[in-house]
Image: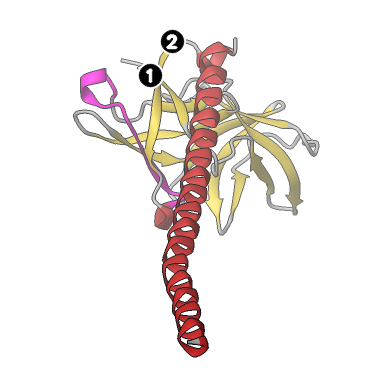
Amino acid sequence: MKKSLEYMVFACILLFLFVGKDILCSYLSKKDFNLEKSIVLDTEYQNLKREYEDLLKTNDLDLPFLKEGIVSKVIVHDPYMFFEEMTILKGKKQGIKEQDVIVNELGYVGRVKTVLENSSQIELLTSSNTILSVKVENSYGILKKEGEKLVIGDITSKEEIQKNAIVYTSSFTNIPGEIPVGKVTEILSNTLEQKIIVEPFVDFNNLNYVFIRKSVSYE
């Protein structure tokens, strides 16, 4: 009788452990799922919050180079072409044309390269194909990508340029002038020419919304 009672108690313990294990696993699994879901939702919220703040900045800042244009969301920023190009959610139907200028609240972003019906591909300032006429202090030159750096060459003046001087777009091409591009971080000089290293103002790692301006027509 005693052994039978012991067997019954042992069986009840095993049953409890078996059923309890499933309940515990189910509870922990649900808890992990809820935690993961909470993390995802929080990340999405933070992303949307940042995009909303960027949109407000782009619309509200009273900067001359943000006038007369439209706002667009960045929809594709390919990691394999990250510093070459990106895609925005505006195209032919919204009046976008090739060579239109892309800026944000910090300055020059790039130019429209290809236009589709409702999207456009942008060639960024940091692209290896960049050739941009710029002004720094009282001198003018051509900004290009050399290796990993943005460099101004073909400078028209022998005037000494100061470190941290602001670089702007010139008004010598169909790109509107006086758009901030970056600042001078290094000056390389020899007897033949002067070259200037530029650090862009725009943070190309965080582009959510941009502003499209029409290129200047001289026709």
- State how far apart marks 1 and 2 are (Cα): 8 Å
> Mark 2 — residue?
68
Q: Which is more toward the observer, 2 or 183? A: 2
For this orientation, the residue located farthest to the bottom is: 3
In this picture, which residue range is highlighted in magenta? 82-96
> Mark 1 — residue?
214
Label 1 sits on what residue type? Lys
Residue at horizontal 39 percent and vertical 21 percent from the top: 215
Q: Which quadrant of the view contains residue 68? A: top left
Q: What is the secondary structure assignment of the residue under circle 2?
A: loop
Residue 94 located within the stretch drawn in magenta: yes
Q: Is residue 204 left or right of residue 215?
A: right
Mark 2 and mark 1 in contact (Cβ < 8 Å)?
Answer: yes
- The colouring scheme, among rainbow, by chain, secondary structure or one colour, is secondary structure
Q: Which is more toward the observer, 86 or 60? A: 60
Residue 123 located within the stretch drawn in magenta: no
Query: In the image, residue 83 lies at what x, y percent?
Result: 48, 49
Residue at horizontal 77 percent and vertical 36 percent from the top: 164
